[in-house]
Image: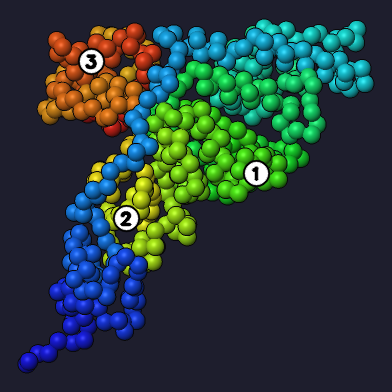
Amino acid sequence: MDNPLSEEEEDYLDLLLGDPINEDDEDIPYVDLPGNNIGDSEASSQSTSGSQDPLARPDIYWKDQTDEDTECLDSRSVPFRPKRQPGLQLGSNITRQTSEGFRKPQLVLSICIATNQYAASLIAKGQNLSYVNPDGTWTPVTVDEMYRFIGIIIYMSFIQLPSTDKYWSTSPLYKSCNSIIASTMTLKRFKAILSFIQINGDPDKDEKLTRIQPLIDHIQTTSQLYFHPFETISVDERMVASKHKFSGIRQFVKEKPIRFGIKLWVLADTVTGYTYSFFVYLGKKRTYLINKSKGLSYNVVMELTKPLFNQGYRLYTDCFYTSLHLANDLLQNHTYLIGAIKANSTAMPICLKGDVHLFNKFATRGDFRWHRESTFVFVQWKDCRTITFMSPIHKGSSVSDCMRTLEYRECLVMSLLDVNTCSKDKTLNKNCIPGILDNRKDCSFCSASSRMQGLKYLSVKTTYYCSSCKVPLCYTKDRNCFQRWHSDEESYTMELDGFFCLNIQIAGKKSLWTAK
């Protein structure tokens, strides 16, 4: 040849043409994995037939959507059949029934009794005498007074001032925020109850949670009574901020926004974020393990999911919890674990573990490959980094879309600043009149309704929108979402934590609708 190719150009041409790899190549090691049949050139070419990448190497194990997963579902798989209707179990008056559910008179009465007994014992010892009456007696706390005290504590959690005294300040700077508290209870009485308050009048000093265990039990029971999860649930840890230093159960988790505090193991509904079940982590030495041979993460998941066994729930976990032992035992109870897997986990198939460095090098963002072993399918997906997860109920060749952004923060700021959002009072006003869009868009009410009921996302196009609320809404004889959106009667079906508009917009996949 007049212009012979350089060595680099020949190597690149070999890659494009799919020529066999030189085993002496130092940059990319030759990998011969069990089941890959790399020595057989015909089998080697078949193993890469699913890849659409012209640079795919013949020594990379590869199956994607072009390789059909023909395996049947496990015989233990059952449809989702919950024992109760998923969602809130409250009826129409959510605010009143939720308040009454968590305001248990028997519990509050026991708190009052324990507080009064503790106050009397300290005063008899000559302590905290600044809170007693002039004659040296203690005014017992009543149930109604304790309710008011708890209300003030909750109020302080979201209206935060520099110090407790500021909530009773007469300064014009704070007075507008303090009128409710000042008229409810005096500062001296609030501090007195705060000094003496006790939840359990008969504490067991050997138990770390003895002073608050009745309250924890009540919250746990009430949380499960008034809500039943939708089909998808998740287990994770949560930190509760705490500054105490001497309890022996405060944890430090570097990656969490709250690094110091009490760690909770939590089972939550993924549709609403509702905490269905939880328990407090007492440390490595104090945590009771049902099955010590299978580790902490196994015991955490089995304990939290036990009330939901045999109902067909889908449990999503991160790599801390996922293991073959857990997945198999949950499957025996008709609960299906879909979880991420650590790179060094024994659950990771050899064919996906041995050449992951090659997959990282040649796969592009969005590429995936899968492998089935018995009951479970393992999928390795390339995003910013390679992630592997397993499932007993999915097909390896199934492809679904991933919505990378949901404009949550924008929507949250707009809701808090009241920018282009409807007011919490959704009564129809003179500015709420139907308008016509230039382009058809998804109805926000239909989308939110399907999401809040745990149904598949329902896309219903409409050409109408509310000129005041700036949201697309159906406005036909058969489907009048415009009226339902502004009706108070419909508000309870989707209102959670007061963010009606926020939930509607997030569930509808839009943060702001601009009408043209």
* Residue under label 1: 251
**In the rendered view, how is the structure colored?**
rainbow
Upstream in the sequence, badge 1 or badge 2? 1
Image: 190 above or below 36: above
Image: 345 above or below 443: below
Marker disc for residue 481: 3
* Quadrant of res 165: top right
SS at badge 2: strand
Q: Tell which of 507 and 316 is nearer to you.
A: 316
Marker disc for residue 371: 2
Marker disc for residue 399: none
Image: 438 above or below 55: above
Q: Tell which of 328 and 371 is nearer to you.
A: 328
What is the number of callouts on the image?
3
* Quadrant of res 286: top right
Picture residue at 17% right of the left edge, 73% below the top: 18
Tag 2: residue type? His
Tag 1: residue type? Gln
Closer to the eye: label 2 or 3: 2
Tag 3: residue type? Cys
Q: Position of residue 242 (x, y in %)?
A: 66, 36
SS at badge 3: helix
Q: Tell which of 300 and 43 is nearer to you.
A: 43
Label 2, label 3: how far apart the Cα atoms are: 45 Å
Q: Position of residue 290 (x, y in %)?
A: 62, 40
Picture residue at 48% right of the left edge, 12% below the top: 95
Label 1, label 2: how far apart the Cα atoms are: 38 Å
Question: Is residue 346 shown left or right of residue 374?
Answer: right
Upstream in the sequence, badge 2 or badge 3? 2
Upstream in the sequence, badge 1 or badge 3? 1
Q: Tell which of 480 and 91 is nearer to you.
A: 91
